[in-house]
Image: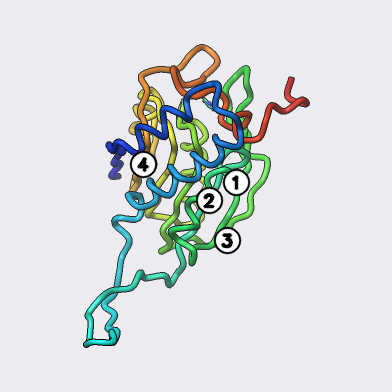
Amino acid sequence: MTMHVTVLDHPLVAHKLTILRDKTTPSSEFRQLVSELVTLEAYEATREMSVSPKTVQTPVDTAHGVRLDVNPRPIVIPILRAGLGMLDGMMRLLPMAEVGFLGMKRNEETLDIITYAERLPEDLSGRECFILDPMLATGGTLATALKYVKDHGAKSITAIDIIGAKPGIERLKKEVPEDIDFNVVLCGLDDKLNDAGYIVPGLGDAGDRLYGALSWKR
Ligand code: URA
């Protein structure tokens, strides 16, 4: 297994991430920033995508370029609910991708992961998979999602998260299945989690900040 973690190191990303963390940033601006940050992450996350030669005629001469290999098409998998806020920003750079969905939530007491929805192609073999989830906290959701896509045949998987926590990364290093290539792309990596499993300092509950607090949750 290879697991590679990239934390974007760029003033634009650091600037936008700081506004995102600020608790006074309203949902409308929060959504916009998440979208912009994911587009910047997508640039890095797609770095290893394979290409084939492609020759075109410019108005002046022949140009030897490339095109992305999209057969089979890459697949983008937002983890509901908060991963949905990242979908637009990702599809802006990869419009030819297919979209699958995984609905997962944490039991807030036990922190166990419950999969409550799944909409994915049966066969993911040979496909580049991009899993979107803003917060890589305990790593539990991502470990469950990884197992899921691997069981469908995926071998090349990239997780795009806005903020990760070191304990979650350490856990994944131990739990990521053998025989897959796994990359994680982050805008920031925080040191710890609190007792409720939130990233510290983090940005709070990403789903609530994107979409507002859920009255039925309380
Ligand atoms: N999920 C969130 O939305 N925020 C965290 O800090 C951890 C998990």
Mark 3 and mark 1: Cα distance apart in space = 11 Å
Q: Do the residues bearing badges 2 and 1 touch, measured as CB atoms within 8 Å? A: yes
Mark 4 and mark 3: Cα distance apart in space = 24 Å
Q: Which mark is residue 77?
A: 2
Amino acid type indicated by mark 3: Pro
**Residue on which disc 1 sits:** 102
Amino acid type indicated by mark 4: Val
Occupied quadrant, residue 80: top right
Say which element carries label 4. Answer: strand
**Label 1 Cα neighbours within 10 Å, binned few <14 / some 14-19 / many ≥20:** many
Q: Do the residues bearing badges 4 and 1 touch, measured as CB atoms within 8 Å? A: no
**Residue on which disc 3 sits:** 121
Occupied quadrant, residue 3: top left
Q: Nearer the viewer, residue 12 or 113?
A: 12
Evaluate whether residue 184 shows in this view.
Answer: yes
Q: Do the residues bearing badges 4 and 2 touch, measured as CB atoms within 8 Å? A: no
Classify mark 2 as within 8 Å of ligand 1 or not, answering yes or no: no
Evaluate whether residue 5 shows in this view.
Answer: no
Q: Nearer the viewer, residue 57 or 189?
A: 57
Mark 3 and mark 2: Cα distance apart in space = 11 Å
**Label 4 Cα neighbours within 10 Å, binned few <14 / some 14-19 / many ≥20:** many
The quarter of the picture where the C terminus appears is top right
**Residue on which disc 4 sits:** 185
Give the image location of residue 50, x and y in percent: 31, 65
Q: Nearer the viewer, residue 117 or 176?
A: 117
**Label 2 Cα neighbours within 10 Å, binned few <14 / some 14-19 / many ≥20:** many
Residue located at (65% from left, 35% from top): 211
Q: Is residue 39 above or below residue 162?
A: below
